[in-house]
Image (cartoon, helix red, strand yellow):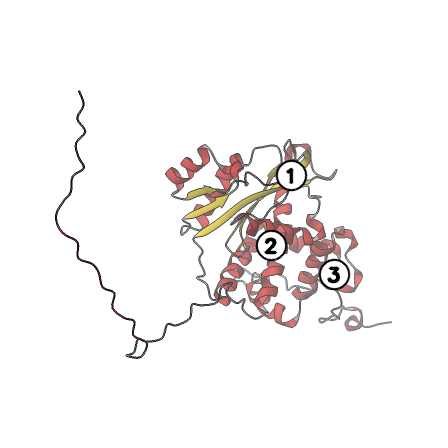
Amino acid sequence: MTSTNETRPPAVRERHYPSDTTDAEWAVLEPLLPVPACALPTGGRPEKHPRRNVVDAIRYVNDNGCKWRAVPVDFGIPWRTVYGYFQRWRASGDLARILAELHQLVRVHDGLNPRTVAVILDSQSVKGAETVSKDTRGFDGGKLINGRKRHLAVDMRGMALAIMVTPAAPHDSIPARDQLFRLRLTHPELVIAWADSAYGGTLVDWSHSFLGITLKTVPRRKDQDGFAVLAKRWRVERAISWIMRARRNVRDYERLISHSEAHITWTFITLLVRRLTRPPRPPRTPPHAVEPLETSANKPKPIRLRKQSNTIRLAPAVLTY
């Protein structure tokens, strides 16, 4: 008969999946996680499983796109427990808080102001699986996709500020009002936003009048044939490609819209944590060279200006009869 200590899973498991957290990543992410219930004044049951294993299991599902029931057994956690953590952290708002705090940490890490004043907006339509209900899906006539639409707001480095998922049927300008309103509440320092021509029209005047945000559209080029890199817009399109690296986001399988937003949030959390464990990103353009001081040897010669007379010459008058 085995003892209780032998049947209990080890606290530190072997990390051999690409989605597992490294020691440096866990040192960044662990302080941001919510306080356990047993440490609160109200009290609670101590957690049975190590949180690092829980985070690794959630990231495994998000990165590989498997079902919750297919969580590997080497994590040592039942799949219902992993799903419970995923759902509770999403419902309590801790997931959105972690993303916001990581966003500020990354900007400071790169030598930028923690609060950005400019954002870029765009949307992406994805197909919905049979698990997506009829009430939470729609048909995008422009992309010919039956599913949901993701609305992203990123800063100038492509890091997400706001994530919103809606049915794919409404035009981009309709849910954009809700997205811009949320941005104004959570980021009052915002001044300007860029988007494609679908966000134009009355939305530009509404954003400036009611929210104080200048919305500028970046249209396609007149001679553009196929894909082309457009100013400002390429940053949010790159962020959308980052989302698609996680296979759980390639297609929408979630019954709840909030769970779709949570999977996208976990994708950006993974990207931001990994960026914090790397050296700071250098600026795109090198700094301007310092001009040498003027000396007698390289002092430029004075420029002589020809003095003009104050006489005003009038053109000859044209006589008409």
Residue 6 spot, x, y in % from top left:
80, 72
Q: Is residue 44 visible?
A: no
Q: CA distance from mark 1 to mark 3?
A: 31 Å
Q: CA distance from mark 2 to mark 1?
A: 23 Å
- In front of the other: 175 or 110: 110
Q: Nearer the viewer, mark 1 or mark 3?
A: 1
* Side of 302 relative to 173 (left or right): left
Query: Please, what is the three-letter code of the amino acid marked with disc 3?
Result: Ile
What residue is at 62 percent from the left and 49 percent from the top? 240
Whichever of labels 3 and 2 marks the residue nearer the N terminus, that label is 3
- In front of the other: 134 or 216: 216
Q: Which mark is residue 77?
A: 3
Q: At numbered mark 1, what does the secondary structure look like: helix, strand or loop?
A: strand
What range is drawn magenta here?
298-309
Which residue is disc 1 drawn over? 148
Whichever of labels 1 and 3 marks the residue nearer the N terminus, that label is 3
Which residue is disc 2 drawn over? 89
What residue is at 41 percent from the left and 44 percent from the top? 213
Residue 95 spot, x, y in % from top left:
57, 55
